[in-house]
Amino acid sequence: MQEETIQAAVDKILEDFNREIDRFRNLESHSTIVLNAKSEISELKDLEIQFRGKKGRIATDLPKIGTLDPKTRPRAAVTIQKMERHIKAEIAHEIKRREAIERQLNDERESIDVTIPGRRPRPGHLHPITLMRQRIEDIFVSLGYIVEDDREIETDFYNFDALNIPEGHPARDPQDTFYTTEGFALRSQTSTVQIHAMQRRGTPVRMIAPGRVFRRDTPDPTHNPMFYQVEGLCVDRGITMAHLKGTLAEFVHGLFGPDTRTRFRPSYFPFTEPSAEVDYSCFNCGGTGCRICKQSGWIELGGSGMVHPNVLRAANVDPEEFTGFAFGLGIDRTCARIYQLDDIRLLFENDVRFLEQFR
Ligand code: DAH
């Protein structure tokens, strides 16, 4: 091969190589380098093989130096070797730049600056309903009650029949709930725990049962399909309505202060006889009338009454020997009153901006 032909072939290889390597010369913005460094290094290694490999351009486009005419051999050898060095150096240089970037990034990732001030942890706090529940529990525990935490899925027997609400009874309607597996439903009242507690513990028994209940209600500012009640039950020999009144009076004293008064209005519940709705004098105005009690001076606490003999019988308690009282209060309702919430659903949305106010 002529010297000029070799020169031309070398020039052509160099031209092609330089076009290829140019793509790698201009490193783009930091973020794209970070993304591409690894794959570009392997592309560069491939490029080197394309030119300097066994079947690369240099091997295929150029004659072996040993086969050249001894007269032109030294100069041709210099030209070819120079080109080879150029290709090798360029590739090595570009690979090095990328490896350096990778190394720097690793260092940044792994380094810890011990002088940076620590981040103050943002401690959480209890939900307002939990705070309310705990206040209620504290008062009743101090009166000798135990706290029951019972199931939320119930059979008809516990939710209705045992509570003197047989099938077809109109009291079932407003307590329509959500049905799960055949024969089971989410409890619509915590009164279910009255039966469980008597069955489990026998008599006498004093217990409260705070917990979730469920009803097929359309949500609005005063209703939610899930809400919280606290049930109370006291069964012993010689329990009378006076004990009920004294207990709830003591409870509102504990919750709202010793000047709080109670009022009992005759009412109807299938599981108590007689039954009464309980009101307490407004914690805000003391009974003179304000916005919170809607000018009436009174706020409704919940339902109560003397446990119906049929309920005692359903739990295998002899109504000739034992009597008792029961009550059911709304935890979230009381919560909404105290904090003057005009929409009870705020308590269930779990918006941190709202909840943070109740630390
Ligand atoms: N379970 C009733 C309800 O959900 C509330 C209630 C009323 C419970 C009177 C009682 C009671 O224990 O005696 O509306």
Image: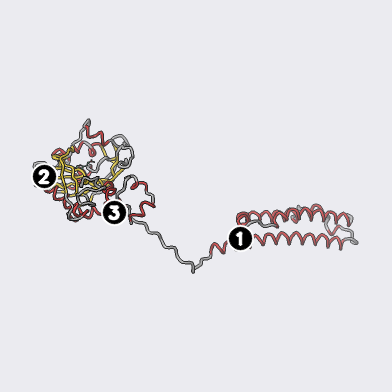
Q: Which residue is mark 1?
A: 102
Q: Nearer the viewer, mark 2 or mark 3?
A: 3
Q: Nearer the viewer, mark 3 or mark 1?
A: 3
Q: Along the polypeptide, which appears first: circle 3 or circle 1?
A: 1
- Dot 1: what SS? helix
Whether residue 231 is visible: no
- Give percent across and percent down for residue 159: 24, 39
Using the numbered discs, state the Cα–Cα distance from disc 2 to disc 1 in whole angstroms: 81 Å
- Give percent across and percent down for residue 212: 29, 45
Using the numbered discs, state the Cα–Cα distance from disc 2 to disc 3 in whole angstroms: 34 Å
Using the numbered discs, state the Cα–Cα distance from disc 3 to disc 1 in whole angstroms: 52 Å
- Give percent across and percent down for residue 293: 24, 46
Is residue 320 shown left or right of residue 54?
left
Q: Is mark 1 within 8 Å of ligand 1?
A: no
Is residue 192 shown left or right of residue 72?
left
- Dot 3: what SS? helix
Q: Nearer the viewer, residue 168 or 117?
A: 117
Q: Nearer the viewer, residue 122 or 187?
A: 122
- Dot 2: what SS? loop
Whether residue 78 is visible: yes
Quadrant showing the C terminus = bottom left
Q: Which residue is mark 2?
A: 322
Tag 3: amino acid: Leu
Quadrant showing the N terminus = bottom right
User: Pointer 1: residues within 10 angstroms few (<14), some, or many (20+)?
Assistant: some
Tag 2: amino acid: Phe
Q: Along the polypeptide, which appears first: circle 2 or circle 3?
A: 3
User: Pointer 2: residues within 10 angstroms few (<14), some, or many (20+)?
Assistant: some
Q: Nearer the viewer, residue 46 or 55?
A: 46
Tag 1: amino acid: Glu
Classify 297 as above or below 33: above
